[in-house]
Amino acid sequence: MRKIIYFWIGSIFALFSLGVIAAFLYITLSTNKLNNLINLHQIDNLREELLVTIQTVQNDIFALRTPFDPKLETIIKNVERMDATIRECNRCHHRPEIKKRIAFIQGLEDKYKAAISFYITTSAKKELIEQYKTEALAIGTEILVHSQRLISAASKKIEITTQETLHKVEMAKKGLFLLLTFKFFLALFCAIYLVKRITRPLDTLVQAVKKITAGELGHVISLSDRTEFGILAKNFNTMSLTLKENYEKLVESETKFRTLYEYSVGWELWLNEKKEFIFCSPSCEKITGYSPEEFMGNPSLLRSIVYPDDRNLYEEHIQGFHLNDERAIEFRIIAKDGSIKTLSHLCRPIYRGNTFSGRRSSNLDVTEKKKLEAQLIQAQKMESLGLLAGGVAHDFNNILTAISGYTYLLNQTLNPDQEKQKKYISQIMEATDRAKVLTGNLLTFSRKQATELKMISLKAVLTNLYSMLKRLIRADIEVSLQTAEDERPILADPHQIEQVVMNLVTNARDAMPYGGKLIIATESLVLGEEMAGKYGAQPGPYMVIKVSDTGTGIDKEILPLIFDPFFTTKEVGRGTGLGLSMVYGIAKQHGGFVAVESEKNKGSTFFIYLPAVKEGQPTQNKDNSLQTDVEELRGNESILLVEDDPAVQMLIKDTLEAYGYPVLTAPNGTCALEIYQKYKNDIKLVILDAVIPQKTGIFLFKELVEISPSLKFLFISGYAKDYLSERQLYPDGVEFLSKPLHPHELLKVIRRTLNNHA
Amino acid sequence: MRFIVILLFILASFDLHAEELKIGLIPEQNIFTQKERYSYLSQYIEKEVGIKINLVMLPRYGNILEQFELAHLDGAFWGSLTGAIAVIRFNVETIVRPVNLDGTTTYRGYMIVRKGSKIKDARDMKGKKLVLVDPFTTAGYLFPRAYFRKSGVENIDTYFKSYYFAGSHDAAIYAVLEGKADVGFVKSTVFQIVSARDPQVAQRILILKKSPPVPSNAFGTKVSLDKKLKETLRKTFLAMHETPTGKETLAKFQALKFIPSPVTDYKPVYEMAREAGIELKSYYLNK
């Protein structure tokens, strides 16, 4: 570009110089002509002077030897002037004919001077003197004549030359004007071209810059130029594309960051060293209900929404704002909608170099987590209670098994006429039955009760139950049943479902001492992950049993305790405190959960969520109904009984031996193994308690199977089969009986087992 | 007081520090030519000596003596006769005179006639027209008076048909050439100059007789001129041929150099005056 600029500027300068030179030449030529003209006029003046001088000399000659006799010096001066004038004329004129004429005049002048000299110096007679005078005058006159002719010719020449010169000057003026005009436009063109040459690419660049400024990043310009502009354009395009790329990266990064902080669950809050808010992520609105702008505009907002009971904790935390440590606390806030939320607050100091410049905090809403933790604790508590209850029930079941069994055996030995004894035994058996129900409830609560799942229709079960329920409910309570139209089948133990509804209806009745409304309803819905996760359940389709009352409601303080076993608000003797525990246990056992809504003096609604059947889901346990005669129960196969409870062991042994079976007993797995090793050829069936000391039933089972693959087994336990299966304490497909054992049922299952695997 | 005034006048008369020298010139040839010729000298002297030279061209030879007597001149380039008279009458001190181009320092008088005029001597001149130059020239008057006296012509007024004084030697030459006179007496140096300038002079004029040499025109100053100035002028003239500008000036002046010109060099003039029967002391007064 530099070369181009130099070239064009040089061209302009050259044009200017040429113009100047041309003007100078024109002016010079014109002025030369004019100078010549001036010279000619000066020469003309000279010629005039010559004439005057000659005339003067002539006058001097006339005046000589008269009273007006001029001094010789004067004459000499005048002649010298005349001579000088003629010489000047000769010097000025260069044309040959003029020079010739001037030379002639000069010749005459010499003669003139000689004649004058003769006339002045002679002392001759008057006639001779007059002759000299006449000669001198004649020569002078001739000089005059020739001079006048010369002057005349010169004057004409001057006039012609003047005309010519003026014409040439005029032409020169015109030519100069045209030339300068042409050069002006040429220079203008050069200048315009140069300007355009420079400004056009500049304009292109400027427009491109404007476009980029307007946001059109990546805009490239097409500028094929071999000068610096081309390089500039190329670099510009590179810059533009790089800008676009970097901007896109920045946008992407910003989008990521924005997505991160907009969609982050946590609420990012940054304060400067003056505790002024400098950043507040949008998620604060989800958590607190207040927008980032509200927090940014009111720095004391956060402090104002801290839950009063946590305010001291919060203030104490704020005291350490300038400390160089990471600090974490949990405190509650009152959200904009009035709800109470728990925040997990973690803050760190921010440093720029070594200068403290504020703190950055991440605040997570752990309200649900806390609820879940509470639920988990509750569940763990319930689990623990369940374990305890189950354990107690299990042990108690063993006792009841012995009582029930021997009572049965005793009853078998009574004569018909021993009515009193039979009545006593009957009472004992009724009491034992009630105790079984109690242990059954406990086991149900602990989810160890055996369930018999089948695909049922809630509508059918409840409809069937409804009529019975009406008999249980007082007349001042309005009962209604509303079942869902879009019902889904569920996989459940109908008896247990009935039990649940019965318990809830009973509680509802008791909550409405002065009457009210009781509504039993079902609903089909699909639970999302959030709702399902809240209760520790799986998302999917559910059927909900709703039992609503308009009773006294439940205090918020005791609401978390209502499912605890043995918790009751009823008077002593009016409730075992296991009803809702049982409801909770049954719902859990069915893979569902219980929820409750209650308002003091308004009433309560219990929601029992039960998973609906999905496609392909197995719907029914095996139906193992047994209808066998007593005689068909007898046998003679040797049986190994592994039971650690002495009473139960004795009962079963006695029962089996009474029906002809030889029985070997072992109190634990090790002993059982030794006995079997010794009598394996005789023993055909092993009755195993799933939970025995030293070696669990399943391990003993595996060892015995390994010894004798065709050996038959019967597992017995006070725990539910499902419970044992979940813990891999029971091998699927093996016969199982739940305690308390009924001798008749025991014998039937034994006979079937021995018969099936024969 | 009176003494002081007289002293001042005396001192003034000595021209102790003259600013201008008026130098007279005799019309030996065309007065314009003469003036021009001597102006080269005057310009040189002005430059070398640092004094202004005012050349005073005189219409007649005798005017130079008049002007000198009237103290209108400080010096002059004297003719040989006027110089001789000036020495006698005014105690003019001749300082230098030029050496002619041919190396001579003298000139002669020529008696000239037109070729074919059949005049050979004075006897042939009777009744002819005579042209002289000036009564105060050697070649143009003294020489012919001496010649005619020797030739027995006592009265030229009656011997010749007519005679007149041309005033300058070149006028006399042209008078003979043009027939205004039959015989003329001119200065040899002028005759040479005019012959060189006008070839027909040499072609048509015949020199019948030549006079004895007499000194060429010397430069002489009044007695009262400052001695230092006089010495400076003398040295300048004498050294002229040694400087380039001096040589150039001499060439224009048509001389080789200047030499000292003691008054004793005028002896031939005095001799010729005696032969012509002219008493130079009183000659001027009677003319």
Image (cartoon, coloured by chain):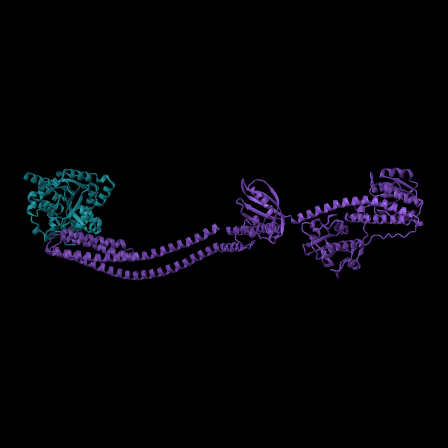
| Relative image position of residue A240 (x, y in whole percent) | 55, 52
Report whether A27 appears left or right of B226. right
Q: Is residue A503 left or right of residue B214?
A: right
**Chain rendered cyan:** B
- Would you say A211 lies left or right of A19 here? right
| Residue B93, horizontal then vertical, whole percent | 12, 40
Q: Position of residue A101 (x, y in %)?
A: 25, 57
* In the image, residue A384 above or below residue A481: above
Q: Nearer the viewer, residue A359 or A603?
A: A603
Q: According to the colouring, which chain is purple?
A: A
| Front-lying residue, A688 or A431 | A431
Residue furthest to the front in view is A420
Closer to the camera, A200 or A54? A200
Q: Does residue B181 show up?
A: no
Q: Please say whether residue B167 is visible from this viewpoint.
A: yes
Can you give x and y, in whole percent of width and height, for residue A206 in the image?
Answer: 50, 54
Q: State the residue at coordinates (68%, 48%).
A: A372
Circle count: 0
Which residue lies at the image location 27% right of the left edge and 57% below the top edge? Answer: A40
